[in-house]
Image (spheres, rainbow, N blue to C red):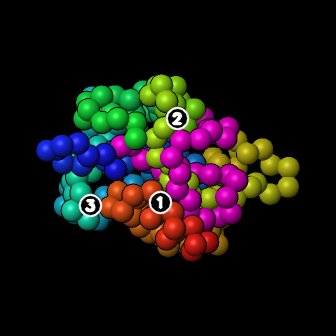
Amino acid sequence: MTEGPGTEQLTVVVGLGNPGPRYAGNRHNIGSLAVDELASRVGGGKFKAHKAGADVLEGRLAGHRVVLAKPRSFMNVSGGPVAGIAKFFKVPASAIAVIYDELDLPFGTVRLKLGGGENGHNGLRSITKSLGTKDYHRVRVGIGRPPGRMDPADFVLRDFSKIEAKELPFILDRAADATEALITHGLEAAQNTFHALN
């Protein structure tokens, strides 16, 4: 997604979530789970603690150099680690792709975009503030709206339902595929492919 003369493309892919086993199966952690799926495709490497406050894995994805990152902070202060990683690897915001949960998309839907609003997502709000721009790529993974009058803040911190949990591996696979397409073919081509699927 970013290339200069004589330099190899580097993309930082960030999976949003909350740290620790208590939150591991929450809807809010779907971004972090998708990055784990990408890590399995990088092959052989393990996440290592980085001084920026994230777990990081460097490797190659479909021939492209990537840095996969999972902030070790809570969701609403994700921006500090993301900005720290961007500074360390000297990448502009446009070379960052953030995978996160999206309430306003039906469960399992995957959408890609560059920039735009945060739509009430505290993780994105923190990243935008820390980077000083909205112009980073987003991989939006739909988790649907809460049932009845449930508070969205409670809904995102609940685990996936049994039915959702059965579908989850396929959704994480699709989110990883979409991210890989974004890195390999660019935003428009990835949108044309994945927006037609759901």
Residue 117 magenta-drawn? Answer: yes
What separation in Å lies between label 1 and label 2 (alpha carbons)? Answer: 18 Å
Which residue is painted at 62% across and 38% down in the image?
118
Disc nearest the viewer among 1 and 2: 1
Marks 2 and 3, how far apart at CA: 25 Å
Location of mark 2 (residue): 134
Q: What is the quadrant of residue 178 in the picture?
A: bottom left
Amino acid at pointer 3:
Leu
If you read the primary sequence from the N terminus, does the residue marked by circle 1 or circle 3 appear first?
A: 3
- Element assignment for label 2: loop
Q: Residue at x 80, y 49 (%)?
A: 150
Sequence order check, earlier mark of 1 and 2: 2
Disc number placed over residue 61 in the picture, else none: 3
Disc 1 secondary structure class? helix
The picture places residue 137, in percent across and down from the top left corner, at: 46, 46
Of badges 1 and 3, nearer the viewer stands 1
Is residue 69 visible in the rendered image? The answer is no
Point out residue 154 in the picture as x, y percentages from the top left corner.
71, 44
Among all residues in the image, which is located at the extreme left? 6
Task: Locate residue 30 relative to residue 159 in the image: left or right.
Answer: left
Report the number of discs: 3
Type of the residue with mark 1:
Glu
Q: Please report contact status of discs 1 and 3: CB closer than 8 Å, yes or no.
A: no
Q: For the magenta stretch, what is the residue range?
A: 95-122
Is residue 113 visible in this depiction of the protein? yes
